[in-house]
Amino acid sequence: MSKPTVGIFGLTGCAGDQLVVLNCEDRLLDVVALIDIRDFLMASSDNDTACALDIALVEGAVLSKRDAETLLAIRKRAKTLVALGTCAVWGGVAAMDRGLDRAKLLEEVYGEVGCGYDSTPAQALHEVVKVDFNITGCPIEKEHFIAAVGALLNGDTPLYPEYPVCTECRMRENNCLLIEHGELCCGPITAAGCNARCPELRVVCTGCRGPIGDANPSSLLATLQERGFERERIAARLRTFAPEGIVQ
Amino acid sequence: MNTIVIDHLARVEGHGGITVEMEGDTVTNVRFDVFEGSRLLEPLLRGRRYDEVATILSRICAICSVAHALTSLKATELAFGVRVSPQTELLRELMYRGESIESHALHLFLLAVPDYLNYPSATALAVDKPAAVLLGLRLKKLGNLIQETIGGRAVHPVNAVLGGFGRVPAFDQLIELRSAVMQGMTDADAAIDVVASLPAADFCHSDTLYAALRSPNLDSYYAGDEVMVVSKGSRAIIRAPEYQELTNEKAVPHSHAKHSTFRGSPFMVGSLARLSVNPRRLTGRLAVAVKRLKLVLPADNPMDNNKAQALELINDVERALELIEQLLREGVKDERPVPVHPRAGTGTAITEAPRGLLIHSYTYDEEGRVVSADVVTPTALNAASLELHLRRAVEQCPERDEAVISKRLQMIARAYDPCISCSVHLVRKR
C-alpha cells in the first residue's frame, strides 16, 4: 500500500499547532516514516504545492483574502481536510473582533498605510470550506495528533472526548474552582481532552479548547451570575477562544 | 536580472517573503515582505480585565509563548506595583531557559542546519545524517520538558499567573528535571561540534548595532529594565519607560510588521546581540566554545547568529542547572500567588525572548481594565536590520546568478530566526 500523501499548512495564527507536530520529537521521525509529507512550508523548502493530498491538516484562522484563496486551493487538493487547533475550528482569539469595523481598526494600528492591507474579519475554516473533522485545542494535544494520524492510516475517523473538562477534573479529584472556590472557571462547557491541565494546577479553565457539543452555557451563566460575576465579564471570557459561541 | 522575488520563505515561522529590485548592478530596493494576516488584538484587549491579558497575548506566538506570557505578567505587575517572590523569579527565569533551549534547537537543527548541508528539510537530512537531527530533537525535548514541568504546557504556558504560579513544581519533579538537564550538557557540547563542522557562511559584512537587555547579574533573560545598544566603540542605555526611543516604530506599505531604528540606524536583537552586549557571560566552557566556533565579537556577519545560538544552548543548559540547584538548595515552597490589587497606571516590561528583546507596555484604569497596550517583538525590531543585511549580501555577492543570490538571501533571513507571527504588530498605544 502506498503511503498517504499529507500536507500541513498554517493560515493566520501563532503556528502553535504545527509546533506541536514538531514537538512529537522522539516519535516525529516514526510518524513521518508512515506518511508521505509533500507540502509543509514551516519544515521544508522542497514542497510540491500542487499535488493531490490524501490528508490536509490546516491550522490558523482565515484573516485575509490571501488566506481564503490558500484554503480553497488546499480544499481542492485534499480528500480529507482536518482543522487543526482552536483558531481553525472556532476562529480563536483573533475572531474576538468580529462585528467591529475592520478598516477603522487597521487605521488605528498602522495609520493610513494600514488601509491598503489585505485584511478580513477572522473566520473559522468551516465558514469558508467543508471541513471533514476537527482536532481542537490551543494548542492541540500531541497525543491527539498522533492518534488522528493512526486513525486516518486505518481508514477510521478519529474520536475525541464528548464531555466537558469538569469530567476529567473530577476524575483527578481536584477541588472545584467554580463551586468550592467561587472562581470564574469555564470547565463545565469546555471540551475535555486536556486532562484538566489548568484546574489540576489550581488555575481556572479559560476555555481554550472551545465549547463542548452540547454545552449548556445558560446554566453556567446562571451559576456564575449567582456568584456575583457580571454578565459582561462572563461573556467576554466565554468569547475569548470561540466567539460564535456561546454567549452573545 | 532586475528583480529577485522569494515568494514564500520556507522553514521559518509565519508568512513572509523577500523582494530585491535592481537596475543593472545597483540594488535599488530590498524588502522583507510580511504578509502574515493582522490579528489586530488591540480592540479586543481594550476593556479586558488585567487577569485575561497574558492568556490572550501568549497567543501572539507559539514558539515564544513563554516570553509573551511572562513579559505580559511582568508588565501588569509593574503597573500594579506587585512584587513577586524570589522563588517566582527563579522559576520564571527557568521557564525562559527552557523556551530558549527549545527554540534554538528547533531553529538550528530543523530549520538552519539543512541549508548549510544543502538539504531541503530536517527529515531529508535525517535520512543521511540522523545523528545531527536526533541531537536537535533531544535538545528540543529537554527545552519542552523544562517548560512543561514549570509552566504546565510546552506551548502557551498555563501555570504562570499574576503574582506567581498556580502550583509550584514539587521537589521530586525538580529532581527529575535536574537529571534530564545534566544529560543535556553533553548534547549542548555536541551541538557546538555540529555547528563548528558546518561550511563557512560568509555572505555579507557590515558594521552592526546590537541591542539587548542589560540584566543586573548579566545573565538573565527576565530581570532588569535597561536595554544597552552597542556598536564598535559606542554604547547607549535606554530604560524601559523610554523604550520608544529604541523602537521608533514606523508602518510601511509592504509589511504588516513595523520598522524600528535607533537614532536613524537599524539594529539587531537576539542571540548575537545578547553576547555582544554581555560578553562577560562568555567564561568557562563558553569561552572554549567561542574559540572552536571562531566567533569574534562584536561580529559583522549576521550568519554568526547561528553560532551565538549554539553558544547560548550551552549557557542555557548550564543556567537551567544552576537555577534548579538553587531551588532545591533553598527548598521549594508551595507558595500561592501574591495577591494583586489593580490600580490605574502604566507598566512597561522588557525581557529577552529567544529571538531578542520583547516589550509589553500596558496602561490600566483604576478597575484594572486595559486602556491601551503596546507590544514590540524582536522580529519587528530586526526587520530594518535584516533588510540592510539582505541589501549588503546582494551588493557583496561576486556572482550575478539569481539562484546563488536567492539562496544566500534565504540563509541570512533564516539566520535572523524570524518569527513572523510575532512580527505582525497586534496592539498599539493610542
Image (spheres, coloured by chain):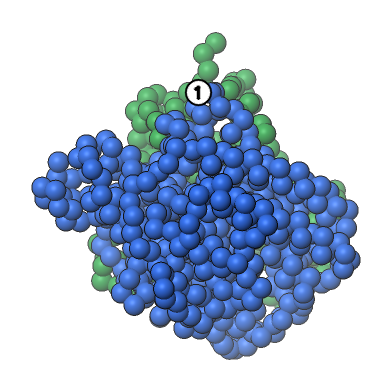
Chain colours: A green, B blue
The amino acid marked with disc number 1 is: Asp
- Image location of residue A232, percent across then percent down: 59, 73
Residue at 31%, 74% in the rendered image: B264
Q: What quarter of the picture does the N terminus of chain A occupy?
A: top right
Residue at 28%, 37% in the rendered image: B404
Up the image or down, B349 lies above or below A57; here it is: below
- Image location of residue A51, percent across then percent down: 37, 24
Residue closest to the eye, A119 or B63? B63
Residue closest to the eye, B156 or A183? B156
Q: Which residue is mark 1?
A: A36
- Image location of residue A83, percent across then percent down: 52, 40
Circle 1 residues within 10 Å: few <14, some 14–19, many ≥20: some
Q: Is residue A76 left or right of residue B137?
A: left
Up the image or down, B331 lies above or below B338; here it is: above
Residue B340 placement: quadrant: bottom right
Provide the chain ID for the residue under circle 1: A
Can residue B369 be seen in this snapshot? no
**Marker count (numbered):** 1
Residue at 65%, 60% in the rendered image: B283
Q: Is residue B210 left or right of residue A156?
A: left
Can residue B303 be seen in this snapshot? yes
Residue at 19%, 40% in the rendered image: B400
